[in-house]
């Protein structure tokens, strides 16, 4: 087991008790963003943080100067800074798997080689070595030097992976679309549902397609099943098209030209039939959901190019440095994590919305769901003892303005408080005007209007003053005091996207540290996987069916009766 000290029970610290008293006092005197803004002309300045090209406006959160100080006291009481430094240094803070947690090493510049040794290995040198291999490979594909089995250049990628081996690459692929410059696109297959593969390979020419199998463990049922299916599809279609004769030798050649893999288990990659030359590795100290900036991002390097990927890594690194070197009181990232603790544990909120006002970020909330919920959905602490307070909130969201016409009603007027992060950018890749109106400004007007409405609301008197009939007035009142954080960037680029991802990685770390949990394991996904193996035979095998509970039996009987 690792030598990480037992977690400090945050709920037993004086800082927690002080926060509780402070919370009770605020409730008593009444929380009012309107009056807090009116009485403190420096509020916005105090709670606004400019970090590189991003502005973080925390002023519309339910905090006073005292709250911020008490939250920082709590962070210090649980040794947040020490644990952060341990993580950066490669200490095995992932206790249940006895592993270092070093996604920050993935984006350190080459000059830092030799600074982090993990289990006797130079982490940064290893990272740079693998990046160089990937960059060389990607350039060959991008330039057309790498050819398929019939001598054609690659125009399409199919990336097969799930969870951390899919959500990050898909999200970034979608986010950076305006920067694709090599005439290569990518389709991502993740679900074991055959519908996913069927739709993704539709219309693809296998002669111009390169398949990337991405799996940290190279044992994941979904990924290996899909990989075998795509391999069969590729060989069958190449044969049908007369590109290969179906002999073992030609099949092997086709696989060598059309399949590459990314994994930490390079021996299993070789067993699959992929040439080790065409396999790219990463390390056990990179969690799946923290891996988009490792070899897991190979599809991105091919589509967007090594330079863009370096920019992406630089964005992550800039936030890593900021998070490590900025005092807590001024540290927007640490404060966002502590605000989440404030809402989760003192206000009792159970969900947190992330609302990007940028269509290119439409998969960002889905990506964050794995990052935050697989990390912090835990009921025991890193020493195996039960948690002492609520942990992981539900993260969810959709891009604005679509969300406004769907679920914002509940955020504005529902009975549950839902803290929300609003993300937007000053500049757009696609300027447009409509009758002289800058459409991006129309869009940003919405971004600003929503947080304003949530913070300051609308009183009954204001509603009445608009001539609203008295019986409808209550339905049109907005209470306000619904907390939001605005992240306003210059432009969505590879750099700013790297920054954003790192921000949420560290927010997740901050929350996990306060709760005393190992944010880097994911045992909660195992039982379902085990049971699926036991249950699947029961579709046909009576003995296996007998062994199931009554509900599962009844559902399988329905299946048996209806399967055609
Ligand atoms: O089932 C959960 C999980 O283990 C995730 O943590 C991981 O990102 C995903 O499966 C995929 O795992 P792999 O990359 O090993 O195929």
Image: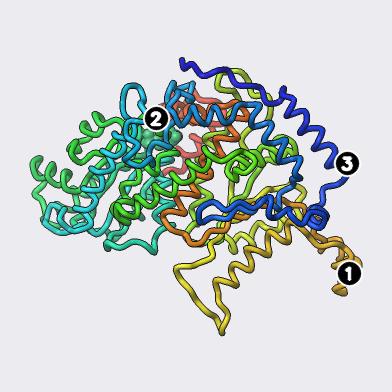
The quadrant holding residue 15 is top right
* 3D distance between C-alphas at marks 3 and 1: 28 Å
Q: Residue at x 59, y 23 (%)?
A: 380
What number is the disc on residue 285?
A: 2
Is there CB contact under 8 Å for labels 3 and 2? Answer: no
Which residue is under mark 3? 28
Which residue is under mark 1? 464
Looking at the rendered structure, the secondary structure element under dot 2 is loop
Instruction: Select label 1 or label 2 by which is in front.
Output: 2
Quadrant of the image for the C terminus? top left
Q: Residue at x 67, y 41 (%)?
A: 339
Q: Position of residue 401 (x, y in %)?
A: 59, 64
What number is the disc on residue 497?
A: none
Q: Residue at x 64, y 66 (%)?
A: 446
Label 1 beta carbon less than 8 Å to ligand 1 = no
Quick check: 516 above or below 452? above
Mark 3 or mark 1: whose residue is earlier in sequence: 3
Mark 1, Cα crowd under 10 Å, few <14 / some 14-19 / many 20+, is: some
Q: Position of residue 437 (x, y in %)?
A: 58, 80
Q: Is residue 192 visible?
A: no
Looking at the rendered structure, the secondary structure element under dot 1 is helix
Mark 3 or mark 2: whose residue is earlier in sequence: 3
* 3D distance between C-alphas at marks 1 and 2: 60 Å
Looking at the rendered structure, the secondary structure element under dot 3 is helix
Q: Position of residue 231 (x, y in %)?
A: 23, 44
Instruction: Select label 3 or label 1 by which is in front.
Output: 3
């Amino acid at each position: 087991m690792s030598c990480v000290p037992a977690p400090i029970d945050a709920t037993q610290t004086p800082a927690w008790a002080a926060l509780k008293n402070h919370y009770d006092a605020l409730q008593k005197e009444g929380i009012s963003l309107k009056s807090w803004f009116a009485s403190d002309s420096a509020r916005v300045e105090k709670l606004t943080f400019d970090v590189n090209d991003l502005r973080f406006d925390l002023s519309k959160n339910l905090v006073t100067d005292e709250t911020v100080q008490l939250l920082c006291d709590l962070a210090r009481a649980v040794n947040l800074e020490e644990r952060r430094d341990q993580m950066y240094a490669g200490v095995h803070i992932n206790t249940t798997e006895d592993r270092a947690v070093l996604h920050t090493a993935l984006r350190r510049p080459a000059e830092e080689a030799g600074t982090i040794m993990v289990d006797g290995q130079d982490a940064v040198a290893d990272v740079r070595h693998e990046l160089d291999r990937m960059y060389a490979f990607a350039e060959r594909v991008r330039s057309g030097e790498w050819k398929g089995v019939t001598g054609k250049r690659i125009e399409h990628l199919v990336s097969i992976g799930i969870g951390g081996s899919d959500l990050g690459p898909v999200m970034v692929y979608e986010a950076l679309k305006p920067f694709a410059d090599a005439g290569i696109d990518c389709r991502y297959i993740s679900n074991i549902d055959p519908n996913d593969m069927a739709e993704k390979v539709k219309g693809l020419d296998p002669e111009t397609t390169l398949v990337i199998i991405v799996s940290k463990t190279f044992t994941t049922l979904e990924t290996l099943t899909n990989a075998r299916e795509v391999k069969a599809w590729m060989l069958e279609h190449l044969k049908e098209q007369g590109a290969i004769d179906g002999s073992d030798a030609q099949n092997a050649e086709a696989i060598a030209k059309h399949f590459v893999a990314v994994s930490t288990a390079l021996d299993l990659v070789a067993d699959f039939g992929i040439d080790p030359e065409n396999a790219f590795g990463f390390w056990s100290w990179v969690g799946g959901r923290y891996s988009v900036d490792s070899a897991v991002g190979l599809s991105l390097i091919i589509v967007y190019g090594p330079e863009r990927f370096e920019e992406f890594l630089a964005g992550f690194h800039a936030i890593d440095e900021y998070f490590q070197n900025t005092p807590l009181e001024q540290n927007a990232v640490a404060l966002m994590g502590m605000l989440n603790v404030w809402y989760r544990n003192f206000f009792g909120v159970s969900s947190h919305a992330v609302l990007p006002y940028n269509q290119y970020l439409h998969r960002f909330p889905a990506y964050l769901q794995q990052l935050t919920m697989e990390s912090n959905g835990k009921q025991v602490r890193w020493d195996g003892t039960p948690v002492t307070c609520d942990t992981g909130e539900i993260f969810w969201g959709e891009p604005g303005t679509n969300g406004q016409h769907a679920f914002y009603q509940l955020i504005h007027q529902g009975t549950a408080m839902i803290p929300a992060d609003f993300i937007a950018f000053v500049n757009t890749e696609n300027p447009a005007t409509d009758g002289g109106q800058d459409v991006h400004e129309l869009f940003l007007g919405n971004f600003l209007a929503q947080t304003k409405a949530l913070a300051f609301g609308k009183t009954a008197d204001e509603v009445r003053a608009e001539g609203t009939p008295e019986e409808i007035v209550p339905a049109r009142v907005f209470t306000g005091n619904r907390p939001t954080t605005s992240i306003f960037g210059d432009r969505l680029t590879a750099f700013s996207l790297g920054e954003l991802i790192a921000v949420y990685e560290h927010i997740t770390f901050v929350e996990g540290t306060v709760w005393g949990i190992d944010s880097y394991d994911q045992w909660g996904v195992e039982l379902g996987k085990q049971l699926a193996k036991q249950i699947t035979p029961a579709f046909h095998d009576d003995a296996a069916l007998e062994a199931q509970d009554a509900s599962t039996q009844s559902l399988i009987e329905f299946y048996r009766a209806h399967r055609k």
